[in-house]
Image: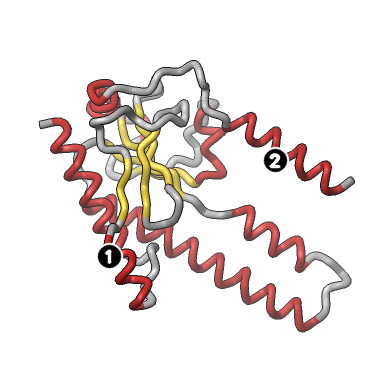
Amino acid sequence: MKCVLKVLSLFFIALIFMPNSQAQRLTSKQALDKLENGFLLIRLDMQKNKAQAYQKILDNPQISEKDKTNVKQKLENHTKERALYKSNVIKAFNENYTFSKLAFIENQHFKSFLEGSTNEVILADSTISDLPSDGNFLLLAKGNHDGQWIVIDDNFKRVASPFPSSFGLGIKKLWDIFLGKKNIDLENQVKLAEKVNKAFNKAYN
């Protein structure tokens, strides 16, 4: 029964976030117009579900002390890692992205933002009143991992080519694996922010 409920829950979540198949992909010009007249919203993947899963295990009164200590450490490490990720992404883009206005939001608050709430929006150097409320924004979201960003619109569709819509670390990612570095490191997020800024400027010019 629990398995069935879990499957149903995932199904309804998928329905909520399912892209509108009837919506057309933005052209390069439309995407640039959204950035020029609006802002870039970076969705921070805080992986709250993973943290909640750890906490659920800890809340189980039957957990052994050994497992409790182990899971507690995993939760602490996960929380610290995602906080560092958030801090590094915000710092990297605040200091290296200049093409448009900029804002950030944790992924668990994104649905509320689409429904009109700006309470959880983290601003760069602008104010809430400066951010348009008419849908003029592009979303920069995590791709397959923390070292990849993809550009999508509010219908969760990638912007049509030739607009740059995917940014990764390339060969540097392989070298980082060898060195034991992580995608969330500030150096890597700075590199990605510079790539995004350069690509948008090139598309505009």
Quarter of the picture containing the C terminus is: top left
Amino acid residing under circle 2: Leu
Screen quadrant of the N terminus: top right
Q: Is disc 1 surrounded by few (<14), some (14 to 19) or many (20+) residues within 10 Å?
A: few
As drawn, the label of residue 197 is none
Per the image, the residue denoted by label 2 is: 10
The disc labelled 1 sits on which kind of residue?
A: Lys
Assess disc 2: are there few (<14), some (14-19) or many (≥20) residues with their C-alpha within 10 Å of its C-alpha. Answer: few
Decide which of 128, 90 is in the foreground and name it: 90
Q: Where's residue 183, x and y in %?
A: 38, 63
Q: Name the residue under label 1.
A: 172
Q: How many labels does the image show?
A: 2
Distance in Å between CA atoms under marks 2 and 1: 35 Å
Residue 111: x percent and y percent? 56, 34
Q: What kind of element bears circle 1?
A: helix
**Which residue is at a point 30% across and 71% down the rendered structure image?**
175
Q: Residue furthest bottom?
A: 66
The answer to whether the residues at label 2 and label 1 have Cβ atoms under 8 Å apart is: no
Q: Nearer the viewer, residue 42 or 113?
A: 42
Point 27% across, 36% down: residue = 101
Among numbered discs 2 and 1, the one appearing first in the sequence: 2
Quadrant hosting residue 6: top right
Q: Is residue 87 left or right of residue 99?
A: right
Give the foreground label among 2 and 1. 1
Horizontal side of residue 20 vs 188, given as left or right: right
x and y percent of residue 135 in the render?
A: 40, 23
